[in-house]
Amino acid sequence: MNFDISKADAHTTIKVNIEKLDSQFAPELKSHIIMANKSGETNLIIDLASTKYCDSSGLSALLVANRLCRDGGGMLVVSSLQDPVMKLVTISQLHNVLNISPSIAEAEELIAAGDTEE
């Protein structure tokens, strides 16, 4: 499977199991994000530990997730970015827009902290 989806009490995690998040796979990721949003999920963690390459369509999927989570009063955290993907995010200046964490555990802490702030 290209994506593993797991639900916890406070969030849903989408683990991306592909090396290249490009125009071939980004639409599938977007559909998982939209389905999670339509089912009421407002806090998402997208785990990119296995992803070594991302193009503009992959970044677009992350921005869609960020907007849907924010509009629903929740939070998106992008986790475990490999260096090439982090460089693209930084060059695109999306590190100023997206919540990024080095690990799933820290992503869960960010979401828990966000829930207590409201």
Image (cartoon, rainbow, N blue to C red):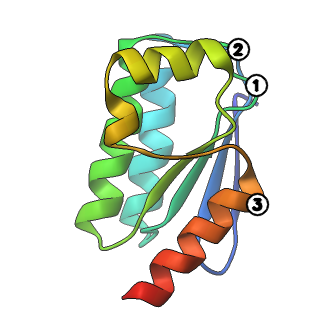
Q: Name the residue under label 2.
A: 19
Which residue corresponds to mark 3?
105
Residue 45: x and y in percent read 58, 53
Q: Are marks 1 and 2 in contact (CB under 8 Å)?
A: yes
Report the mark closest to the observer, 3 or 2. 3
Give the distance between the C-alpha atoms of the residues marked 3 and 1, in whole angstroms: 16 Å
Task: Name the secondary structure under disc 2.
Answer: loop
Dot 3 falls on a residue whose secondary structure is: helix
**Few, some or many residues within 10 Å of mark 2 (<14, 14–19, 20+):** some
**Number of other residues with Cα within 10 Å of mark 3, as a class: few under 14, some 14 to 19, many 20 or more:** few
Q: How many marks?
A: 3
Q: Quadrant of residue 110?
A: bottom right
Side of 83 relative to 97 (left or right): right
Q: Mark 1 points at which residue?
A: 50
Question: Which label sits in the foreground, 3 or 1?
Answer: 3
What's under tag 1, amino acid-wise? Ser
**Distance between mark 3 and mark 2 Cα atoms:** 22 Å
Location of residue 18 in the rendering, given as x and y in whole percent from the top left corner: 70, 20
Q: Residue at the spot x=76%, y=25% of the render?
A: 50
Residue 55, position in %: x, y?
44, 10
Q: What residue type is labelled 2?
A: Glu
Q: Residue at point 64% right, 30% down?
A: 81
